[in-house]
Image: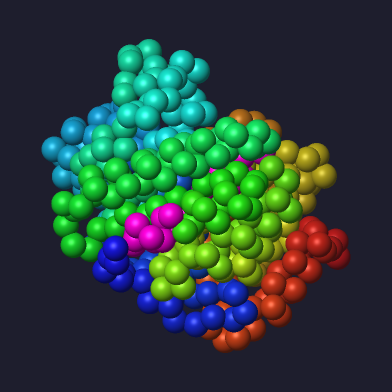
Amino acid sequence: MSLPHHFELLKTDGAARTGRLTTPHGVVRTPAFMPVGTAGAMKGMHWREVREAGADIVLGNTYHLMLRPGAERVAALGGLQRFTGWRGPMLTDSGGFQVMSLSELRRVTEQAVTFRSHIDGTKVELSPERSIEVQRLLGSDIAMQMDECVRLPAGHADIERAMQLSLRWAERSKRAFATAPDGYMLFGIVQGGDVPALRQVSARGLVDMGFHGYAIGGLAVGEPQAVMLAMIEETAPALPADRPRYLMGVGTPEDILEAVARGVDMFDCVMPTRNGRHGMAFTRFGQINLRNARHIDDPRPLDEESPWPAARTYSRAYLHHLVRSGETLGAMLLSEINVAYYQELMQGLREAIANGTFEDFKTKTRAGWARGDIAQK
């Protein structure tokens, strides 16, 4: 069954794509990286900084928000955008991955997943219908179907069972989403682990159902990068060219560059803020560990050519001092520097694809990472 189009594919360069996704709360330029605001907040950053860094869309987490403060409460307070102060587009995941990864006591049945809250131990049931209900109460622009994700490596039988269950849950998720207002979107999630044939079955089943967009799930869960890229190569060509493609939970700048080369449009990951809290900076020269003693007397900024002020303003010596002293400001500055670098990378990708220079951009970007830290003068 066909659903309305909200995505406009503007240009391709090889398999790489740039486009525009229109949501009720604004336009998302693709390729897009979604910073993760798990519980309705970006750790260490104000929403204003997230917007100024160049992000069009952010991600909220259904599992965490349904447990605290509660989806019904968020709805009563005007939905996620009004509740949080982020006025742009939001995507919410289904909560399925967190149920699997955070809840020690859980039981999966055809009907639902039951688990104990990691906050207070309360027994909670999450079905495809409830997941969609929660996401609609939150008011996210893009909701995700409920699925089951298995960690890799895993046995063929377990991967196939989870994939088939996810297909059945996709049907139920779509039925539950049918009453959503025009403009809001539901994405299906391709599962199948590291088994190409199962990925194909999952993709065909979802495409036959018809979704506003399609995600590639069940990757970046323990498998080598080569396996992840091989599964993208298996999956992306099986998805409609006129719908956005979202690689869930990915990842490093290198992962993003390679996935865009294989036709992926959207990404999310906690890495920019999580690594920032641990003293790591992402730059056009690769990662820089500000905990290292070699920065203690270094007066240079992280990158004097960066468009982001904090990357140009603060010395490596000062950032090193903040990190080693455990000062909150260090985590805040590195988080915003990292989010800004990811957005700078996405803007570079969009421009390169639009100009037909993607391969050149990819080569120069990788050369910068390989070169490493700015050479000493």
Q: Which residues are magenta?
A: 205-222
Q: Residue at x 48, y 65 (%)?
A: 239
In the rendered image, residue 305, in percent from the top left (x then y), is placed at: 65, 69
Q: Is 66 above or below relative to 88?
A: above
Q: Residue at x 78, y 69 (%)?
A: 367
Left or right position of 280 against 267 = right
Of the 4 image quadrants, the one containing the C terminus is: bottom right
Instruction: Indicate whether 74 appears above or below 224.
Output: above
- Picture quadrant of residue 181: bottom left
Q: Nearer the viewer, residue 60 or 100?
A: 100
Q: Residue at x 64, y 47 (%)?
A: 195
Q: Is residue 218 magenta?
A: yes
Residue that sits furthest to the bottom in the current view: 355
Q: Position of residue 134 (x, y in %)?
A: 26, 38
Q: Is residue 317 left or right of residue 116?
A: right
In front of the other: 240 or 110? 110
